[in-house]
Image (cartoon, rainbow, N blue to C red):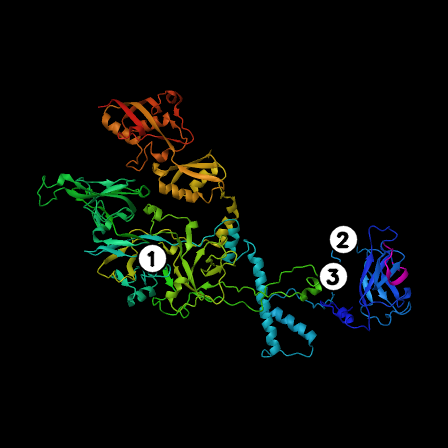
């Protein structure tokens, strides 16, 4: 045979005629029950047609081949008859079997039994097919073997001549010259070099493709390592391997004061006014209310549909958008403090409550006020007010009360109400405690200045970025004709020339080697590559914010981590349902952005945004295993925001224009817009060099909690105002529970909201199999008594008042903290008697001090006086409030001697 074929039909043709006979197969008689001198000495050659007795003799059969044993001697040839050796009962062989006896068995190599005319001629005998007159066999075919008995047939093709390749050719010019040199060898008569020639055009086209592929090869090697990668997406993916999230920056936030005109009462300023109130699609329904930096004078409100709005945007202002709804009340524009007829008053540093002059029933918990100094304390002039003395607070309590001293029976009933002057008592979140003293009224010489500081209401939170929407306001327009911000915006169809490699299966000869082309495979086209680019930048990266569940404090609204920042973009696919109008798009799922697709299921409509160094944004979709793969011919429309980074950290008083799509917000409602405080939180995208420095050491940070110390350290990493934490493992019946005890700043209690947020933060550190609980520390009340000798010339009562102030748990007037302030004590911290002596001696007028009682409350002991320290257990924190209303929280007594 000179061919390798997948379907051999020669045997079938010989079987269908009678003029020629041929060998069907050969069988080596090798019965393990026979003696060794008999085994493998007899060959049964089966023919297609019966044999005529005497046609084939010993001279007509030849055995060729062999490696160690060659020239196998044939001792006898018989046609049909009894089997050899004879069996009991005797077995008669068919007439188409030729029995060939040999003198000895061969080795393990392949032999060929051939039918010849005589010993001197190799042609087959007359009447035998020349192709089927020889058969390959092995004497050891019955020997145990782990391989298939059928031998593989491989058609070896001659190796083609390999051209000389210049491996230094890496660009267009060298590839072009290389192909021209090769063509000169193959086609010496072709010497055309005109650029218009078809052959030259093909050579230059291939040189261009080679140049592009060469660049891709170099780029693959370059982008394969974080130290050499030049693309930001490559560095981002390398950093993700060590769990370092390379961030793309964050946008800024700012508190905005909206001044309502007189008579405005309960007008709602919506965060986003819906185009269609009946459309439940919040992502693609409505235009956000915007705030712009100054582009024109004396225009506080700009209608979205007016020409002034387009002119304003053409001036390229910084644009912010509301983050929640706001109900406007003219009475909340400016609210004065009520000092109960006192002068020269101020709110001390750390204050969390105040009184407002008048009743403000529309103030409610959750509202934000800005406490601001509006006049200079020394001059009373607005120009001398310190703009740094402004602070945002979120109310947690509001009470309407009266000052009964000014009731009608005491003064003229015309000038005072019957119940007294109305007063509103407000209290704000401890996180928003005043960071500085705020002057309410002052005196300079004989001049008195009241209302130095006031409270501003109608405060709303806004963040940097302007919304770009591919969905037009006219939702009846065809979505296929609407311009898209993605390039390309259609998912391409698979290229018929690009198919996936077939899976190799089976052990037959046609599945491997030269016969692989014989196996039929179902062609599967390679999925198209779809990585669209966003045509506008920079894409806004905003921290998560729920307008229906706002942060507990104004400070918390301005505090987030880079892990909480996500791209402000959503996209919607068009095509699967052949939507005619935008109202039909509500049945098509919206695609959401994620940081990565590692946890995405095959059906999840997720994608990842990858930002390059120049700000260009590319969208990466799933592969059908991690995240859904977009279907061909699907078109995408986007709603996203642009505006990001430190450029959004605008200064105070920068925002002066408001633009709303709400027709209920005309110029008669808005008197002015401004931001009393500077915007904050804007962060530029992390650079490649910063990531190269930080990412290699990211794996050294413990991202899981195993030991109790790990849980305590993880609680501090949550950045939730935890001064210190301690963890304890306890067996709770069926599993181990980790009790995380936290000491909050300011001595705050572990309420339900804090516990929920902390447990959510600790969840990413928690080890599987560990239950988690958060609880308060064990506060140990102290009982201390001291005898104080007062220096002559000092009033004992004044010295005692100073001592009580120094040993208090409050912030002092000068900004210092009292000795027993909660932030000065933590877990297991002992209380030393030397601290008490030092704090007492530092008070002016104290001559000497003696501690007469120093113990835990309710436990009489002099051990602490003798040792000089009062020990605390691991989860215990000392407490001494000295509050007469709550004596169980610690008692401090001073016995004063001497003085005036």
Q: Quadrant of residue 638?
A: bottom left
Give coordinates of residue 427: x percent, y percent. Answer: 26, 42
Quadrant the N terminus occupies: bottom right
Callout 3 crowding tier (Cα within 10 Å): few <14, some 14–19, many ≥20: some
User: Pointer 1: what residue?
Assistant: 320
Q: Which mark is residue 152?
A: 3
Q: Is residue 868 left or right of residue 796?
A: right
Magenta region includes residue 377:
no
Give the secondary structure at mark 1.
Answer: strand
Q: Residues in magenta?
A: 70-87
Residue appearing at x 21%, y 40% in the figure: 345
Q: Residues within 10 Å of mark 1 (few under 14, many from 20)?
A: many
Would residue 794 be seen by someone viewing this image from the given angle? no
Q: Is residue 892 in view from this perspective?
A: yes
Q: Is residue 73 magenta?
A: yes
Residue 579 lies, in percent from the top left, at: 41, 67
Marks 1/2 in contact by CB < 8 Å: the verdict is no
Disc sitting over residue 145 in the figure = 2
Per the model, the C-alpha gap separating discs 3 and 1 is 74 Å
Position of 682 with respect to 260 (left or right) is right
With respect to residue 122, does 190 lie above or below?
Answer: below
Looking at the image, is mark 1 or mark 2 earlier in the sequence? 2
Give the SS element for disc 2. Answer: loop
């Amino acid at each position: 045979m000179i061919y390798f074929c997948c379907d051999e039909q020669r045997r079938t043709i010989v079987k269908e005629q009678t003029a020629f006979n041929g060998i069907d197969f050969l069988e080596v008689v090798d019965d393990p029950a026979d003696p060794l001198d008999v085994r493998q000495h007899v060959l049964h050659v089966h023919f297609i047609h019966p044999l005529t007795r005497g046609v084939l003799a010993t001279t007509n059969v030849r055995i060729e081949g062999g490696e160690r044993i060659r020239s196998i001697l044939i001792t006898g040839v018989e046609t049909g008859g009894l089997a050899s050796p004879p069996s009991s009962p005797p077995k008669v062989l068919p007439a188409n079997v030729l029995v060939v006896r040999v003198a000895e068995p061969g080795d393990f190599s392949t032999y060929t039994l051939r039918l010849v005319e005589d010993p001197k001629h190799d042609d087959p005998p007359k009447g035998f097919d020349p192709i089927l007159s020889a058969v390959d066999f092995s004497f050891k075919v019955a020997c145990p073997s782990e391989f298939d008995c059928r031998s593989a047939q491989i058609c070896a093709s001659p190796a083609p001549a390999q051209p000389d390749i210049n491996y230094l050719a890496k660009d267009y010019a060298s590839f072009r010259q290389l192909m021209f040199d090769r063509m000169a060898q193959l086609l010496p008569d072709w010497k055309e070099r005109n650029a218009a020639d078809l052959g030259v055009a093909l050579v230059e086209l291939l040189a261009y493709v080679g140049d592009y592929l060469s660049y891709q090869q170099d780029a693959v090697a370059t982008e394969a390592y974080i130290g050499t990668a030049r693309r930001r997406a490559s560095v981002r993916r390398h950093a993700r391997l060590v769990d370092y999230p390379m961030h793309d920056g964050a946008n800024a936030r700012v508190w905005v004061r909206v001044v309502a005109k007189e008579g405005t009462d309960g007008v709602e300023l919506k965060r986003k006014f819906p185009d269609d109130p009946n459309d439940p699609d919040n992502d693609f329904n409505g235009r956000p209310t915007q705030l712009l930096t100054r582009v024109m004078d004396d225009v506080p409100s700009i209608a979205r549909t007016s020409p002034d709005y387009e002119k304003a945007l053409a001036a390229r202002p910084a644009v912010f958008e509301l983050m929640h709804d706001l109900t406007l009340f003219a009475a909340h524009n400016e609210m004065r403090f009520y000092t109960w007829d006192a002068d020269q008053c101020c709110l001390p540093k750390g204050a969390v409550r105040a009184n407002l002059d008048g009743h403000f029933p529309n103030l409610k918990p959750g509202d934000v006020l800005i406490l601001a100094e509006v006049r200079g304390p020394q001059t009373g002039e607005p120009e001398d007010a310190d703009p740094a003395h402004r602070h945002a607070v979120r109310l947690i309590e509001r009470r309407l009360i009266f000052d009964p001293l000014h009731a009608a029976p005491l003064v003229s009933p015309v000038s005072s109400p019957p119940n007294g002057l109305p007063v509103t008592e407000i209290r704000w979140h401890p996180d928003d405690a005043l960071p500085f003293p705020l002057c309410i009224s002052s005196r300079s010489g004989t001049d008195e200045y009241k209302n130095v500081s006031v409270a501003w209401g109608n405060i709303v939170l806004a963040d940097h970025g302007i919304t770009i929407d591919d969905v037009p306001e006219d939702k009846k327009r065809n979505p296929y004709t609407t311009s898209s911000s993605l390039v390309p915006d259609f998912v391409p169809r698979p290229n018929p020339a690009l198919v996936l490699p077939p899976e190799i299966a089976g052990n037959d000869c046609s599945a491997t080697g030269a016969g692989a082309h014989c196996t039929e495979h179902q062609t599967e086209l390679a999925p198209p590559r779809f990585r669209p680019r966003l045509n506008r930048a920079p894409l806004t990266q905003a921290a998560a914010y729920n307008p229906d569940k706002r942060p507990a404090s104004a400070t918390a609204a301005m505090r987030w981590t880079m892990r909480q920042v996500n791209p402000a973009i959503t996209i919607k696919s068009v095509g699967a349902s052949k939507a005619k109008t935008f109202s039909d798009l509500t049945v098509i799922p919206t695609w959401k952005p994620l940081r990565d697709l590692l946890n995405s299921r095959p059906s999840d409509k997720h994608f990842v945004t990858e930002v390059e160094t120049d700000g260009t944004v590319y969208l990466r979709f799933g592969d059908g295993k991690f995240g859904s793969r977009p279907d061909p011919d699907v078109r995408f429309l986007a709603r996203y925001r642009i505006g990001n980074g430190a450029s959004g950290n605008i200064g105070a008083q920068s925002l002066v224009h408001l633009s709303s799509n709400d027709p209920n917000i005309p110029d008669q409602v808005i008197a002015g817009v401004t931001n009393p405080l500077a915007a904050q939180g804007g962060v530029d995208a992390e650079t490649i060099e910063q990531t190269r420095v930080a990412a290699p050491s990211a794996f050294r940070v413990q991202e899981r909690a195993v030991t109790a110390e790990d849980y305590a350290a993880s609680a501090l990493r949550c950045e939730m105002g935890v001064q210190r934490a301690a963890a304890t493992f306890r067996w709770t019946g069926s599993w181990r529970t980790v009790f995380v005890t936290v000491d909050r700043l300011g001595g705050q209690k572990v309420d339900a909201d804090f516990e929920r947020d902390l447990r959510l933060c600790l969840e990413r550190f928690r080890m599987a199999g560990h239950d988690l609980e958060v609880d308060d520390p064990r506060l140990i009340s102290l009982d201390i008594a001291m005898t104080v000798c007062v220096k002559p010339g000092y009033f004992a009562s004044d010295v005692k008042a100073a001592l009580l102030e120094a040993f208090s748990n409050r912030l002092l007037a000068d900004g210092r903290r009292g000795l027993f302030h909660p932030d000065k004590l933590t877990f297991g911290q002992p209380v030393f008697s030397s601290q008490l002596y030092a704090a007492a001696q530092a008070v002016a007028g104290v001559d000497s001090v003696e501690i007469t009682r120093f113990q835990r409350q309710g436990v009489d002991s002099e051990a602490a006086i003798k040792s000089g320290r009062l020990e605390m257990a691991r989860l215990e924190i000392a407490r001494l409030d000295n509050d007469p209303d709550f004596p169980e929280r610690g008692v401090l007594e001073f016995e004063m001697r001497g003085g005036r």
